Amino acid sequence: MTTQQPQVDNDGDHHHQQQDTPSEEEPPAPPRPTKFEVESCQFSHWYPTFRSIPKSSIQNATNYKLRKNVTIESNIIKPLPNEFIEYLLSDGVRLPRCAARVSSCMKDDTADTNGDDGWNDSDDNDDESSNEEVKQYNFPNLTSQIQIALENLGGNCMPKLNWSSPKDATWMNCGTLKCTKVGDVYLLLKSSEFVSFDLERAWDDLEPAITAEGEAVENDQGNDDGKPPKDFEYELVLRKWCNLHPSMEFRCFIYNHELIAISQRHPTKFYSHLQLSDEDEVHPTTEIIHAFFETYVQRRFASGNMHRYVMDVYVDSQERTWVVDFNVWGSRTDALLFDWVELMEIGERVRDIEKDIGENGGEEVDAEIPMPELRVVTKDMKDLTYDPLSSFRGPTDVMNLMGAGNNDDGGFEPSSFKNFMEQCVPPSEM
């Protein structure tokens, strides 16, 4: 059984890189992203493209009704104030003075009449014996923008920065990314290591730009300097909250502009309805996602200038596919039920087939590009898979204090978190 090293991917998911048993020949290392690839996977770079698609530009149309919009409604706030970035990088988990509440899990009467709760007040903390003054952050304009966005999105949202969502910090918010208050947004972002990765390490360890043929781009400068592009801006994204069924979330792997593999998004959950029936040679969900990819995504993402990337999608009850996010190809992104060595080999095989087809000038060849393999958790493997978020469940002592933190089905019980938060004493009362 392989061991796995946790890391962080662009969608805010804790991920791992498979480490095989040592052998005589070391497998090739998963590729690092280029600066162009990191830049292209920023939310604001791809969202307008897939939120409003001119129907006249849609190629490879299938029998499905053409759609103008194939992603979830979202609001983008940028640029962000420098004080907000400083706040996110500061030590501790403390809400700014402009936030009304610690968490939506707390009772309404825990907030005072001035709109601030005791967790944010420093008025009672001027103990003369204290040698360290805690900085109080305040950005009312940003708070107002978030409040307006929340209202525009129907009162509920899911936050993220340029790349990552704070999935590792959901234990701070009743086990969910759903935000109904501005304070929820701040609390999740401030508590997340994935968000910190966006702020501190997004431009680290990049490789020189390459073409689809694997050749270095001439005059490529600054890919390994650890610095963002000159016009780079941090952005806060608020996505409309949707109750997505976890079983219908999938991760798609694209190489040389072809969809080569699909993985179940949650690699520890077994879903009986995802199992391939004996009558089907190709999984029906594979056909749905593949048709969507060829119609709406292929050579459209990054204007066709990025041949390898990872796409997260959701298939709804009407068999419509929605783009959830884009991630860079390689070690920063979790390969889930595949591994990166395997994905690179599949990608190279597909590229060789395309090369043979091209060299024959359209004449018949023995091979054709295969349909992508869809991997789901089966009964045999459901106890052997690794949960990428298993290292981010909150401090052990906190979880113990919460007591009944899980329900009988092994899921998170929000009421237990609420009870725990009601027992917490604000610093001003200590």
Image (cartoon, helix red, strand yellow):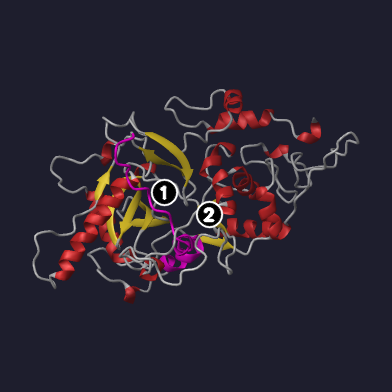
Which quadrant holds residue 291?
bottom left
Q: Quadrant of the C terminus?
A: top right
Q: CA distance from mark 2 to mark 1?
A: 13 Å
Disc 2 target residue = 204
Q: Is residue 129 above or below residue 60?
A: above
Horizontal arrangement in the rendering, residue 333 relative to residue 418 (left or right)? left
User: Which structural element holds mark 1?
Assistant: loop
Label 2 environment density (alpha carbons within 10 Å; few <14, some 14–19, many ≥20): some
The magenta stretch spans residue 37:
yes
Disc 1 target residue = 331
Name the residue: 63% across, 44% down: 187
Name the residue: 67% across, 31% down: 422
**Extreme-right residue of the structure:** 128
Mark 2: which amino acid? Asp
Q: Position of residue 236 (x, y in %)?
A: 58, 57
Report if residue 87 is visible in the image. yes
Q: Are marks 2 and 1 in contact (CB under 8 Å)?
A: no
Q: Position of residue 90 (x, y in %)?
A: 69, 46
Horizontal arrangement in the rendering, residue 30 relative to residue 40 (left or right)? left
